[in-house]
Amino acid sequence: MYVLPSLFTAGNIAAGYYAITQSIQGSAAAPEFFDRAALAIGFAVLFDGVDGMIARLTNTASDFGKELDSLADVITFGVAPSLLAYLWGVRAVPVAGYPHLHDRVAHLGIFVCFLFLICGASRLARFNISVNPQPRNPGRPGKKYFVGMPIPAGAGVVASVIHFENGSPIDDPRLSVVWLCLILFTGFLMVSTWRFWSGKEISLGQRHPFQLVALIVAIGAVIALYSEYALIVVALGYLVSGVLARLAYSWGQKKRRQTSATN
């Protein structure tokens, strides 16, 4: 039973390795390789969630499994999406029309995509050493949150946008700048101390699990039928949820200060 969670972690690594190999082969003439890489990262997110769930349900969590999972996440959700983001959104852009801008964006792209990778690795390191971490903008008492966007969610943002375009790379250096801003902001969210919903309160061991199972099946069916739209809505919606939670907390804190000042 202790091997079972590690098998899903190995699947996570395999998906990340496959995504890297497909990214290298992608180009404007062969966008399907980029799309395959994005889908592989999407499947890896599923594997990453399943291995932890199985370890908790079977009570087979181990130090080896935790370390292997962290190393897998660096490869699959750090190296693979950062390489894919650069090759799809920067290197594949045609040089004609904007030669000087293309060169500048290319150098900037290497730096920004590396920042995404180092932010993801730092997020994992902080998670591994943290004991009961608390976000800067706490939510409901007793409810668990992630401190900073999890690295699988950050990789999901990259993969969902590329899959939404069916792998067709960016063809304008100005759009590449917008793309790099999204990559940079996603990296910032990973190392931030803002709260993100963890979903750990959801459990199949609840008193009435049938409604939950039906909901999961329905969501899976929507993703399978309309994956381009469903995945980008989920990925970007999760990103925006953390930003809105932070803004709502700041606004509420400011309002409380004004109320106390008038009293």
Image (spheres, rainbow, N blue to C red):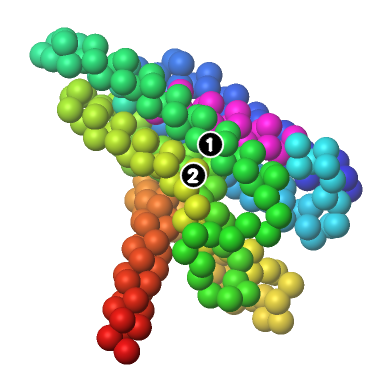
- Tell me the quarter of the image containing the C terminus: bottom left
* Callout 1 crowding tier (Cα within 10 Å): few <14, some 14–19, many ≥20: many
Image location of residue 245, percent across then percent down: 40, 64
Camera sees residue 171: yes
Please report the bounds of the magenta region as a residue range. 68-88
Prevalent SS, magenta region: helix
Q: What number is the disc on residue 190?
A: 2
* Secondary structure beneath label 1: helix
The residue nearer to you, when weighing 151 against 43, is 151
Residue plotted at (45% across, 24% down): 114
Pointer 1: what residue?
Answer: 120
Image location of residue 205, percent across then percent down: 74, 72
Q: What number is the disc on residue 161?
A: none
Image location of residue 225, percent across then percent down: 42, 52
* Amino acid found under the numbered disc labelled 2: Met
**Circles 2 and 1 in contact, beta carbons < 8 Å:** yes
Residue 119 is left or right of residue 62, and the answer is: left
The residue nearer to you, when weighing 153 against 217, is 153
Instruction: Decide whether residue 87 is among the magenta residues.
Output: yes
